[in-house]
Amino acid sequence: MKPAFPFIITTTIALLITSPSFSQEMGLQKKNTNGKMIIEQTVKAYGGEKTLNAIDKIYIDYKTTIISRGQSRGTTPPWDTIIADQKEAIDFSKDLVITEYTGQGGGSKVSIRTEIEGQSGHRLDLYSETSAPIYNTDFQSLAGQITRTNSTLLLKQAIKYKNDCKYLGEQLYNGKPHHLIQINPNNEPSITLYIDKSIKQISKSERSTDNFKIEYFFGKYQKQDGLLLPFQSSYSVNGDLARTMEVEAYTLNQPVRDLFSKHSTFTNILGDKVTPPATTVLDKGVYWVTQNLGGGLFGQSSLFIEFKDYVLMVGALSGARQRINHIKNKLGEKPIKYAIISHHHSDHIGGIQEIVEEGIPILVAKAHQGVISDSLSSKDKANIVVVGSDKSFYDESMRVDIINIGPTPHSIDFLLVHLPKLGIIFAADHFEIPSNGPLPPQSENSAFLAKLIQENNLNVTRIIPSHSARIASYEDLITVNNT
């Protein structure tokens, strides 16, 4: 009799091969193998793994067009665009990243340089010559943003993750077949690469985070120092084009700090350190509540004005609920009759959902009603009250005038809040000065505001900002515009 074990072994192997789990595992291995092979082929087309890994320092000079969807003067297309000079640099061995942005839009001009080395960094305002520390940041966060907008750097990153990549199959893109490969960077959302099947170039990538799908597009490839580089890139958010970038020059493996212009000594100012709500009493019944949620150059504030029977709130930046709860601790349960929304820009309506959930009606310019309603997740709960050109609130102790001063350089419609007896105005974004340090240079917004005050003979001594933790005087405004 022949032994039974060959039959048992053969049967076992057959069962393994035909089992669903085995087939899935083998299929996954095949997909991963295909993905790894395609990444290696693409790396070869870009100059080879050795050439890509030899990129230790890179400096990119862009001409950038920003589509200001959430920051346009109007509420409907065509959206305002900002043409800007943008410089980006990474030194991988030093964990150093530098970006510089110079542009003008919304009535303001900006020139900001950001430098992150390791876990620390600072932000330089090249116009005001001020330096602010950046908290809670790191090299990988900013370097990752630069990498995602440049396909060559993205491929350099993909080399690290090629063994664990996923091959998602083929798909037509711009009429051409593309391989779709998913890479999974550590502690980040996965990225899908669209690699042209015939020429092995990355045409597109995409990633999703929270409620946003971001797509990046690459083109106009050229060879430089044996390396294939894109000279055109752009990205969209949820299908809407956000930015286009045309490369004017690449500089490889040169000390990156030497490639940025030198400036004189900067004045140190406060940074974006997270601070809880704090109240400044501006006058009897007038309270300015400031805070900083972090993650940016400026903070968030709201003005609360107390009448005999109610309170008015001005300003709806993010963190609104925290500021509301803070003022309630001071004023008790006196109802907030309205929250006045100065304009429709995305940062200035960032706290509206919280305000609505608190049951507070919102007062808006007619032109902004649609944008603000669309921003809410619970429209049925919103009580939106429209202001025409002017509206006033007053009792025996207080008067508040709301004036639509549009069109301004910043927004076609804009609700200015004026306390005529006290000489106080809330003119969000039209005149914001740093929390300490020198005054900023003149802008279209500051010139407009000075002219408005003078021509309408408004009593103004104090200008309350929405972002800064420093109140400007009328004399500050005149000084800036006479400089």
Image (spheres, rainbow, N blue to C red):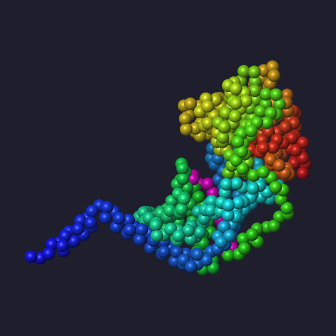
Considering the image in quadrants, where does the N terminus appear?
bottom left
Q: Residue at x 77, y 33 (%)?
A: 287
Q: Position of residue 391 (x, y in %)?
A: 74, 27
In the displayed structure, would residue 1 be above or below residue 72? below
Task: Give the residue displayed 87% in from the left and 48% down from the top.
Answer: 480
The part of the image, by quadrant, that contains residue 302 is: top right
**Image coordinates for residue 456, horizontal then vertical, percent:** 85, 34
Q: Is residue 60 left or right of residue 35?
A: right
- Please report the bounds of the magenta region as a residue range: 237-252
Look at 64% across and 74% down and name the residue there: 56
Magenta-drawn stretch, dominant element (helix, strand or loop): strand
Based on the picture, tell me whether residue 241 belongs to the magenta stretch: yes
Res 231 quadrant in image: bottom right
**Residue located at (71% from left, 45% from top):** 275
Of the pair 357 and 338, the residue shown nearer to us: 357
Q: Does the rendering let one see residue 440? A: yes
Position of 223 relative to 341 (above/below):
below
Residue 234 in percent (x, y) is at 60, 60
Determine whether, in the image, residue 112 is placed left or right of residue 209.
right
Would you identify the image quadrant in which residue 396 lies? top right
Task: Examine the structure image and report whether residue 280 is included in the region drawn in magenta.
Answer: no
Q: Is residue 310 left or right of 479 when viewed as pictured?
A: left
State whether residue 408 is above or below residue 67.
above
**Residue 382, image x, y percentages:** 59, 31
Residue lying farthest to the top in this orientation: 396
* Residue 301 visible in this rendered orientation of the protein: no
